[in-house]
Image (cartoon, grey):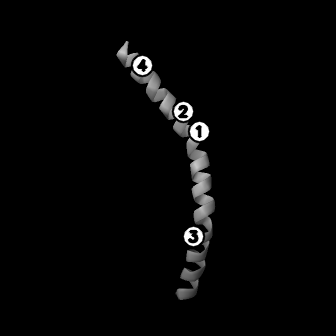
């Protein structure tokens, strides 16, 4: 019975992560895309 509870818990955690990850990535990307863009542009200028 314990193993079944563990499996259900892991499934719930996995589903929660799968739902949360796109939002986390989107927020992270929007914050970092500006910095990344600047880094790429400056890298081209520095070369």
Identified at 59% across, 38% down, the residue is: 19
Instruction: Relative to 18, say whether 26 is above or below.
Output: below
Q: Are marks 1 and 2 in contact (CB under 8 Å)?
A: yes
Q: Compute the Cα span from label 1 to label 4.
A: 21 Å
Q: Earlier in the sequence, mark 2 or mark 4?
A: 4
Q: In the orientation shown, which residue stands out farthest toward the bottom?
A: 46
Q: Is residue 40 above or below residue 9?
A: below
Disc on res. 8: none
SS type, badge 1? helix
Q: Which mark is residue 5?
A: 4
Give above or below for 38 relative to 21: below
Res. 15 mark: 2
Question: Quadrant location of residue 1?
Answer: top left
**In the structure shown, which secondary structural element does the residue marked by tag 4 occupy?**
helix
Callout 2 secondary element: helix
Q: Is residue 6 left or right of residue 46?
A: left
For the residue pair 30 and 39, the one nearer the viewer reads as: 30
The residue where tag 3 is placed is: 36
Question: Which mark sits nearer the N-terminus, 1 or 4?
Answer: 4
Q: How many marks?
A: 4
Please tell me which residue lies in front, 43 or 11: 11
**Disc 1 target residue:** 19
The percent position of residue 41, horizontal first and vertical second, equals 60, 79
Tell me if mark 3 has few (under 14), some (14-19) or many (20+) residues whose alpha carbon lies within 10 angstroms of its own: few
* Secondary structure at numbered mark 3: helix
């Amino acid at each position: 019975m314990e193993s079944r509870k563990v499996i259900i818990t892991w499934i719930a955690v996995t589903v929660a992560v799968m739902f949360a990850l796109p939002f986390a990535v989107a927020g992270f990307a929007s914050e970092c895309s500006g910095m990344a863009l600047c880094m790429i542009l400056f890298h081209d200028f520095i070369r």
